[in-house]
Amino acid sequence: MKKKSIVYLVVIVLVIFAILLLTFMNNTNSSKNNKESLQKLKVNEVTRSVFYAPQYVAINKEFFKKSGIDIELMTGQGADSVMTSVLSNQCDIGFAGPEASIYVYNEGKEDYTEVFAQMTKKDGSFLVARNKTDNFDWKALKGKTVIPGRKGGVPYMTLEYVLKQNGIDPRTDLILDDSIKFDLMAGAFSSGNADYVTLFEPTASTTEASGKGFVVASVGEAAGEIPYTAYFAKKSYIENNEETIQNFTDAIYKGQVWVKEHTAKEIAEAIQSFFPDTDIESLTTVIQNYKDIDAWNETPVLKQEAFDRLQEVMSMAGELDKKVPYDKIINNTFAEKSINK
């Protein structure tokens, strides 16, 4: 009787083990099949910045995967590099300033790029000074040297716009050193070049924490609303991949909604994997700074009045000879469907 009980016990254990093994194999195969069924999308972002928190939330909260997309994210370090990557088919979707698409359209390219989802509506850079400044006034930049980024880029033009609004002539009242590449600006400033530099977060706060400079102003807060960063793709790609673009936009919109509905600390915890060298407290502060200036668009729709203002800023900077019709390069079809779902 005792022997039979032992046999029964062994059989039961073996059955349980077999069930667990089959369950594990099924889950593994299911996970593998799900991964294989996802469509891989190559996205080239202009830089890695907390400014793009809704995008990182959409990735880490798996909004893209739930939409059937596996994101391969690369960082171009400049709008011109991102646009080159899109036009040469090195990536599927670009993420940079809409001005890049305006330039391409005016060059007469037949397969130009269309902007289909807006992320940010303010300039995300902060002015960092060499010396600590109390009660900062933009007029303090007169006679100084500033590292503003690439001439013709939105960061450069937005800074020019702010300077003009404060009675400063960018051509004669100060030196705008645009010879330094975007990804080298912080290093150049820390090495002693220039009196001021415009930097995105978390680089601006990191520079201040290292004692190399002091954040004195938000360019975005001073400039007001402008379509600063958006997603775009070649017209032919959008026409041939409408479902993919829709699914992508749906995920971005979910990221925007999530960021709006959650605290700075919750957002920091959600995106920290993209900024491993920045602690939660610093990330939280930076995100709150962006919330305070209302940096993020609530929806992916890029409105005509915002687009018109961008072209006005470009014209004032002497970078735009011919304005582009709004309906030629702005495609809100997918953004509007995302909102209505």
Image (cartoon, rainbow, N blue to C red):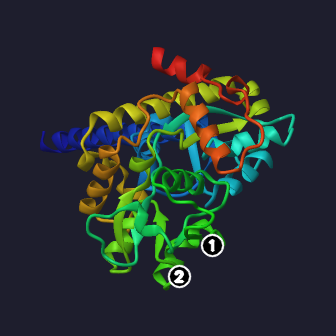
Which residue position is annotated with label 2? 193
Question: Would residue 208 be visible to someone looking at this image?
Answer: yes
Q: Quadrant of the N terminus?
A: top left
Pointer 1 local density, CA inside 10 Å: few below 14, some 14–19, many at least 20: some
In the image, residue 268 sits, relative to residue 39, either above or below, namely: below
Residue 162 position in % (x across, y down) = 49, 52
Taking the image as shown, residue 151 lies to the left or right of residue 26, namely: right
Q: Out of 207 and 312, give the one closest to the viewer.
A: 312
In the image, residue 240 sits, relative to residue 139, either above or below, namely: above
Q: Out of 136 and 251, give the one closest to the viewer.
A: 136
Q: Out of 164 and 315, give the one closest to the viewer.
A: 164
Taking the image as shown, residue 80 lies to the left or right of residue 204, namely: right
Taking the image as shown, residue 226 lies to the left or right of residue 218, namely: right
Which residue position is annotated with label 1? 180
Among numbered discs 2 and 1, the one appearing first in the sequence: 1
Residue 95 position in % (x across, y down) = 60, 45
Contact between labelled residues 1 and 2, with CB atoms less than 8 Å apart = yes
In the displayed orientation, state which residue is furthest to the left: 2
